[in-house]
Image (cartoon, rainbow, N blue to C red):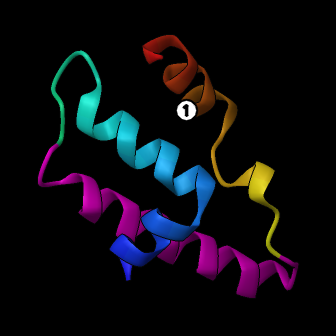
Amino acid sequence: MARTMVAVNHELKELYRYLKTRPHNSLKKQALVVISNKIVTVIYNLIKKQTEYQAELVLGEFRKNQIRQAA
């Protein structure tokens, strides 16, 4: 499921690309595990809060800044 989400979802694709290529301590094999955890967290929060998916909320400001700095 994580590979499919990385292929389809823009935000998770950015996160995956960042995790594989980050300057310090790149996570080549663990990146899909991190994405899987993120998917479970998003699904849990959607059910808990009974809201619709909002792409801009998937990545927090801290992670968005990390991705911008790495690019």
Location of residue 47 (image quadrant): bottom right
Which residue in the rendered view is the most extreme toward the left? 29
Please tell me how many numbered marks the rendered image carries.
1
- Residue 51 vs 69, above or below: the answer is below
- Please tell me which residue is depicted at 48% across the width and 77% down the height of the picture: 40
Q: In the image shown, does 34 or 15 lie closer to the viewer?
A: 15
Quarter of the view holding residue 41: bottom right
> Residue 59, percent across and down?
63, 45
Q: Is residue 63 depicted above or below 27 in this figure?
A: above
User: Residue at 82% of width from left, 63% of height from top?
Assistant: 54
Q: Is residue 62 left or right of residue 30?
A: right
Q: Residue furthest top?
A: 69
Residue picked out by circle 1 = 63
The percent position of residue 48, horizontal first and vertical second, equals: 74, 83
Magenta extent: 28-52
Coordinates of residue 36 in the picture (x, y in percent): 37, 70
Q: Is residue 37 magenta?
A: yes
Query: What residue appears at the point 86 percent right and 78 percent down from the top-left corner?
Result: 52
* 17 lies above or below 29: above
Which image quadrant: the N terminus? bottom left
**What's the residue at 55%, 69% (across, down)?**
8
Residue 14 drawn above or below residue 30: above
Q: Amino acid at mark 1?
A: Arg
Magenta segment's dominant SS is helix
Asked if residue 44 is among those painted magenta in the image, a careful observer would answer yes
Circle 1: is it few (<14), some (14-19), or many (20+) Cα within 10 Å?
few
Identify the residue at the far right of this view: 51
**Helix, strand or loop for disc 1:** helix
